[in-house]
Image (cartoon, helix red, strand yellow):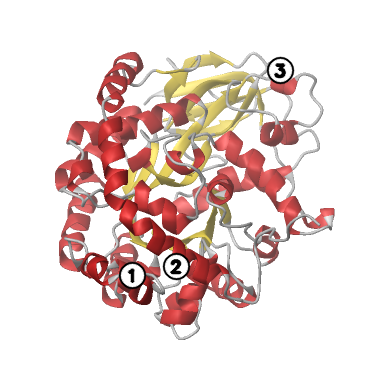
């Protein structure tokens, strides 16, 4: 039995006016919170951490992430999603990573998250040009070695570009159609075999710290049969299901063009696959009927506000979701669409972007709403009871925040300052499953300096390869731009953007 006692700490208390308790103690044993208070019975040999009057709170949960592009920060300009994806994940042999490269790029994200107080991540990992057991193992091993809590899925489309996007069949010149009609190398049975590997090898390892999820990527990117098979796996093993839905206006138009006028949410519901295990990712171009279906199914929503701004996707109707009791979590999305892996900046953006949704400030999200999404909301979608709380029995995923730092000087409102002021630099210590994995701005679970030096050398030489990859897909850019423009002109009965220019 291993125990840690935090003493002289203020505990986050979102319900109190001060946002925190008076100075007290909290005990962790065997990776879980035992309880708090000055009358705790401390086991012999417990490690004692003096909180020095600082704040002890649940770690932040990055509830939506794609680790595969951790090494590509700042690589691309702001572009609409459908154009952005041409450069983000082209299925080219030149971009096939070695297992070591996959390990290192995953570890880059782990180090950034743990330093800044993110203790858990849901990785909807895509693999270019396709996944292999060796690359899956490399990604999962990085999560295991770093000490972070992680849930890993295989984000792999099954259908061709012509099948999953509107207008391309009429816009693409004849010489490009064979390329656009080609399905990915791995079909449904191949992908299900890889899920057998992921689940059999990694689900529940590290005393449950590493887990599996399943991902359809998006409903329009897979066949109904494969989508149903993924749902069956999810049901069998109680795994989250990742599904990007209605991230862009083009995806709303797609429903009109290819799904008989149904939205992707309605289509998923009609297949019988919208469930409480599903994480609906983005959910920007949803209407009231979509939200009613999500609420009735008790599905969850992942909000990625910085990525949505970076790609011009629009503003998610957050208040309408909260009014329906939909559980909302927050995510970075990916380093190439955020240019950081920092949940504090995600919280700050989520706390501000929804002021654009209407003029009634009473319907704007509060700092408490945002902090709840970044902690409790993430725990709910991760399907880990108690995660994101300080409740007795909850996983001991905790961070110690220095209240003497400039972010809290002077202390005006703790929760607002956590959401709007803190940037991660005040995090003194990060604990996952009862183990200290970062302290003093450095990850202690691995040889951080050696890994960063290796990553600098490995990825520093990749710029020419990435430039060649961009050149190889450049012929598709005008076709995809025309597709985007066609969709932009379509009236879909709503807007999620500021489209009116200056007078």
Asked whether disc 3 touches disc 2, contact meaning CB atoms under 8 Å apart, the reply is: no
Q: Report crowding for label 3: few under 14, some 14 to 19, many 20 or more residues within 10 A (C-alpha).
A: few
Residue, disc 3: 406
The relative height of residue 59 versus residue 408 in the rendered view (above or below) is: below
Residue, disc 1: 172
The Cα atoms of the two marked residues, 1 and 2, are separated by: 9 Å
Secondary element under disc 1, as helix, strand or loop, is loop
Q: Residue drawn at (54%, 42%), measured in percent from left and top?
A: 388
Q: Residue drawn at (70%, 22%), measured in percent from left and top?
A: 407
- Report the number of numbered marks: 3
Left or right position of 121 against 428: left
Left or right position of 173 against 374: left
Q: Taking the image as drawn, is residue 298 in sight?
A: no
**In the rendered image, which quarter contains the C terminus?**
bottom right
Q: Report crowding for label 2: few under 14, some 14 to 19, many 20 or more residues within 10 A (C-alpha).
A: many
Query: Which circle's residue, 3 or 2, is located before the other in the chain?
Result: 3
| Front-most of residues 199 and 330 | 330
- Percent across and percent down for residue 191 are 20, 60
The Cα atoms of the two marked residues, 3 and 1, are separated by: 55 Å
Q: Residue drawn at (28%, 58%), measured in percent from left and top?
A: 156
Query: Which circle's residue, 3 or 1, is located before the other in the chain?
Result: 1
The quadrant in which residue 389 appears is top right
Query: Which circle's residue, 1 or 2, is located before the other in the chain?
Result: 1
The relative height of residue 221 versus residue 308 in the rendered view (above or below) is: below
The quadrant in which residue 190 appears is bottom left
Label drawn at residue 483: 2
Secondary element under disc 3, as helix, strand or loop, is helix
Secondary element under disc 2, as helix, strand or loop, is helix
The Cα atoms of the two marked residues, 3 and 2, are separated by: 48 Å
Left or right position of 460 against 134: right
């Amino acid at each position: 039995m291993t125990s840690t006692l935090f003493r002289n700490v203020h505990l986050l208390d979102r319900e109190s006016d001060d946002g925190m308790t008076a100075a007290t103690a909290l005990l962790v044993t065997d990776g879980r919170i035992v309880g708090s208070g000055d009358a705790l019975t401390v086991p012999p040999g417990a490690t004692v951490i003096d909180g020095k009057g600082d704040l002890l709170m649940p770690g932040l949960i990055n509830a939506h992430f794609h680790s595969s592009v951790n090494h590509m920060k700042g690589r691309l300009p702001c572009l609409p999603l459908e154009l952005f994806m041409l450069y983000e994940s082209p299925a080219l042999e030149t971009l096939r990573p070695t297992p070591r490269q996959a390990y290192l790029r995953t570890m880059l994200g782990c180090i950034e998250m743990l330093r800044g107080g993110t203790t858990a991540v849901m990785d909807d990992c895509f693999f270019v040009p396709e996944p292999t057991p060796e690359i899956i193992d490399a990604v999962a091993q990085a999560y295991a070695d770093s000490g972070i809590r992680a849930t890993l899925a295989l984000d792999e489309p099954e259908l061709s570009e012509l099948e999953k996007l509107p207008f391309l069949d009429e816009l693409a010149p004849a010489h490009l159609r064979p390329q656009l009609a080609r399905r990915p190398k791995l079909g449904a049975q191949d992908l299900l075999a890889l899920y057998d590997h992921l689940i059999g090898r990694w689900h529940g390892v590290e005393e449950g710290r590493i887990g599996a999820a399943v991902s359809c990527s998006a409903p329009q990117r897979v066949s109904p049969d494969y989508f149903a098979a993924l749902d069956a796996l999810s049901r069998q093993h109680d795994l989250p299901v990742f599904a990007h839905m209605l991230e862009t206006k083009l995806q709303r138009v797609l429903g009109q063009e290819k799904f008989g006028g149904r939205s992707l949410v309605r289509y998923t519901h009609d297949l019988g696959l919208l469930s409480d295990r599903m994480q609906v990712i983005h959910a920007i171009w949803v209407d009231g009927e979509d939200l009613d279906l999500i609420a009735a199914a008790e599905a969850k929503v992942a909000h990625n506000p910085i990525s949505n701004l970076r790609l011009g996707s629009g503003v998610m109707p957050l208040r309408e979701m909260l009014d329906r009791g939909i559980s909302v979590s927050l995510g970075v999305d990916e380093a190439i669409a955020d240019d950081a892996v920092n949940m504090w900046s995600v919280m700050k953006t989520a706390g501000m972007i929804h002021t654009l949704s209407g003029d009634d400030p009473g319907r704007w999200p509060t700092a408490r709403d945002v902090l709840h999404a970044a902690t409790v909301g993430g725990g709910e979608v991760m399907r880990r009871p108690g995660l994101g709380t300080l409740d007795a029995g909850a996983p001991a995923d905790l961070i110690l925040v220095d209240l003497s730092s400039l972010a809290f000087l002077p202390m005006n409102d703790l929760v607002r300052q956590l959401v709007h002021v803190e940037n991660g630099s005040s995090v003194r210590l990060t604990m996952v499953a009862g183990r200290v994995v970062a302290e003093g701005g450095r990850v202690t679970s691995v040889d951080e300096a050696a890994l960063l030096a290796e990553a600098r050398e490995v990825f520093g030489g990749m710029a020419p390869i990435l430039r060649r990859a961009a050149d190889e897909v450049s012929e598709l850019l005008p076709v995809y731009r025309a597709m985007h423009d066609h969709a932009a002109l379509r009236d879909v009965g709503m807007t999620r953007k500021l489209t009116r220019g200056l007078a």
